[in-house]
Image: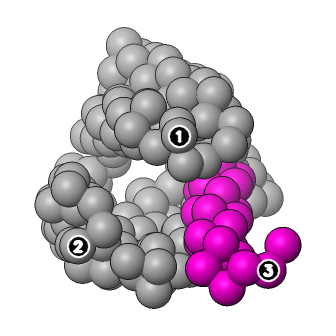
């Protein structure tokens, strides 16, 4: 189980760095390029994040009961990423809704994860807060879809997505650190070292 937890932690680091990269790239693009690039950047992000989610789920089959939820989420992310490249114009219309629903699902999973592991990880309230923010962000994306918005409104949505990706990536890195600390404490107890 400790080896699997180490692998899961490494995958969380990769997912966190990927989300940070996506957010920074999206925010760094000139405003004129943001709208066109958001679809392709998201497609690449969805595929890569889906692959890492599937890897994490397969690494956690014996360690976590709900590993199949991560597997399902990863597979869906890969399919959405591929669909984005095949039908970019169609995806532009549904991208914000997908991001909204995904944020709500991930927020709920993050809260459930924090509650289940509150005896093992420290500062679980950060993950609960992050889950709540994710749910609120998802609701905002669903309530204010990109269709029919002004170009300025689309840019605001692009900025919100970029900031959300950076915050989500940072939380994944913190979670990876928490898991590594838990593994370190367990290994220290086994060997008797401080």
Task: Give the vertical position of 111 relative to 23 (above or below).
Answer: above
Q: Is mark 3 on a helix, strand or loop?
A: loop
Instruction: Point out the image quarter for the N terminus.
Output: bottom left
Question: What is the number of the mark on residue 68?
Answer: none
Circle 2 residues within 10 Å: few <14, some 14–19, many ≥20 = few
State whether residue 83 appears in this view. no
Q: What distance separates the C-alpha of mark 3 from that of mark 1?
A: 21 Å
Number of numbered discs on residues: 3
Q: Which mark is residue 119?
A: 1
Judge by depth and name the residue closer to the eye, 151 or 133: 133
Above or below for 175 versus 164: below
Disc 1 secondary structure class: loop
Of helix, strand and loop, which mostly describes the magenta segment?
helix
Q: Residue at x 51, y 55 (%)?
A: 38
Q: What element carries label 2?
A: loop
What crowding class fits label 3: few (fewer than 14 Cα within 10 Å), some (14-19), or many (20 or more)?
A: few
Is residue 60 among the parts visible in the rendering? yes
Q: Which of marks 2 and 3 is in front?
A: 3
Cα distance in 3D space between marks 2 and 3: 27 Å
Residue at far front of view: 192
Residue 82 coordinates in the image, percent (x, y):
23, 73
Q: Quadrant of the C terminus?
A: bottom right
- The residues colored magenta run 168-194
Residue occupied by mark 3:
193
């Amino acid at each position: 189980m400790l080896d699997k937890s180490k692998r899961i932690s490494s995958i969380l680091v990769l997912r966190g760095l990927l989300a940070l990269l996506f957010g920074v790239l999206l925010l760094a693009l000139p405003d004129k390029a943001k709208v066109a690039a958001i679809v392709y950047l998201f497609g690449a992000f969805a595929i890569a994040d889906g692959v890492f989610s599937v890897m994490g789920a397969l690494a956690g089959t014996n360690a976590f009961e709900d590993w199949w939820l991560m597997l399902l989420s990863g597979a869906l992310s890969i399919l959405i990423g591929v669909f984005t490249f095949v039908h970019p114009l169609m995806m532009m219309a549904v991208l914000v809704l997908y991001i909204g629903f995904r944020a709500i699902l991930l927020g709920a999973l993050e809260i459930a994860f924090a509650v289940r592991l509150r005896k093992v990880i420290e500062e679980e309230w950060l993950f609960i807060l992050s889950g709540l923010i994710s749910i609120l962000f998802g609701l905002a994306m669903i309530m204010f879809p990109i269709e029919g918005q002004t170009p300025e409104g689309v840019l605001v949505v692009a900025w919100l997505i970029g900031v959300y990706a950076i915050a989500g990536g940072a939380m994944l890195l913190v979670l990876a650190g928490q898991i590594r600390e838990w593994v370190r404490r367990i290994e220290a107890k086994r060997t008797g070292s401080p």
